[in-house]
Image (tube, rainbow, N blue to C red):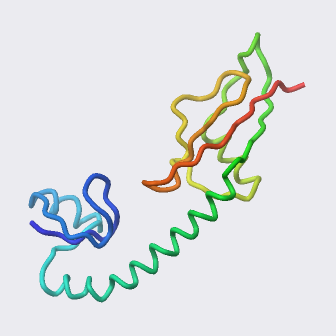
């Protein structure tokens, strides 16, 4: 079945693409979730008219991402934590802690954009990737210091 993607779908395509998928995948998942519509003549003509609007939205999103990337570029977040012994801290630094610090700096992102493989449990400087889009990832530095 040929469908027109309404939103970006990982490993399938971007919004506005016409792709061929199995019938069940389209009928049971993509179309009910609002991710796609059937590719018939009416929808293809409507897509041609909406391409200009879609391109304008994509350009706006790119500008927003660029502005956010400039804010995040070279950003160092400092956190103070109690130390148990040697370099180990009491508790850990998680995505929520990083998200709260970013909010204090006036930067609004989603928790799922912070790629932290495991919580930080030691004192030191760590690089944490922030996924802005499927193509762009920025690293910020998290400096964990001993609380006096």
Tell whether 143 sits left or right of 147.
left
Residue 59: percent from left, percent from top: 48, 74
Asked where in the image residue 116 lies, by quadrant, the reply is top right
Question: Toward the viewer: 44 or 93?
Answer: 44
**Looking at the image, is 74 positioned above or below residue 6?**
above
Quick one: 75 or 90, which is closer to the camera?
Answer: 75
| Residue 120 occupies quadrant | top right
Please identify the residue farthest to the right as the structure is shown: 148
Total count of labels: 0
In this view, the residue in front, 42 or 64, is 64
Query: Quarter holding the N terminus?
Result: bottom left
- Looking at the image, which residue is at 68% across and 24% down? 91
On the image, the x and y values in percent for residue 86 come to 76, 11
The residue lying toward the viewer, choosing from 60 and 146, is 60
| Residue at screen point 71% across, 54% down | 103
At a point 40% along the width and 78% down the height, the residue shown is 55
Locate residue 23: give its quadrant.
bottom left
In the rendered image of this protein, does residue 41 appear above or below residue 84?
A: below
**Image quarter in which the C terminus is found:** top right
* Position of residue 97 measured from the top left corner of the image (x, y, whole percent): 68, 40
Residue furthest top in the image: 85
Q: x, y (%) of residue 133?
A: 47, 56
Q: Residue at x 26, y 69 (%)?
A: 5
Left or right, 105 with respect to 1, comes to right
Does 46 sit above or below residue 23?
below
Q: Is residue 33 left or right of residue 146?
A: left
């Amino acid at each position: 079945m040929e469908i027109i993607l309404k939103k970006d779908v990982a490993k399938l395509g971007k919004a506005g693409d016409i792709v061929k998928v199995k019938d069940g995948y389209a009928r049971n998942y993509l179309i009910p979730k609002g991710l796609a519509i059937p590719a018939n003549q009416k929808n293809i003509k409507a897509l041609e008219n909406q391409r200009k609007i879609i391109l304008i939205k994509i350009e706006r999103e790119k500008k927003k991402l660029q502005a956010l990337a400039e804010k995040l570029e070279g950003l160092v977040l400092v956190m103070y934590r109690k130390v148990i012994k040697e370099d180990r801290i009491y508790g850990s630094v998680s995505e929520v802690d990083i998200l709260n610090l970013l909010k204090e700096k006036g930067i609004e992102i989603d928790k799922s954009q912070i790629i932290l493989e495991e919580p930080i449990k030691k004192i030191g400087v760590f690089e944490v990737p922030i996924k802005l889009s499927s193509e762009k990832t920025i690293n910020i530095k998290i400096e964990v210091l001993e609380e006096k």
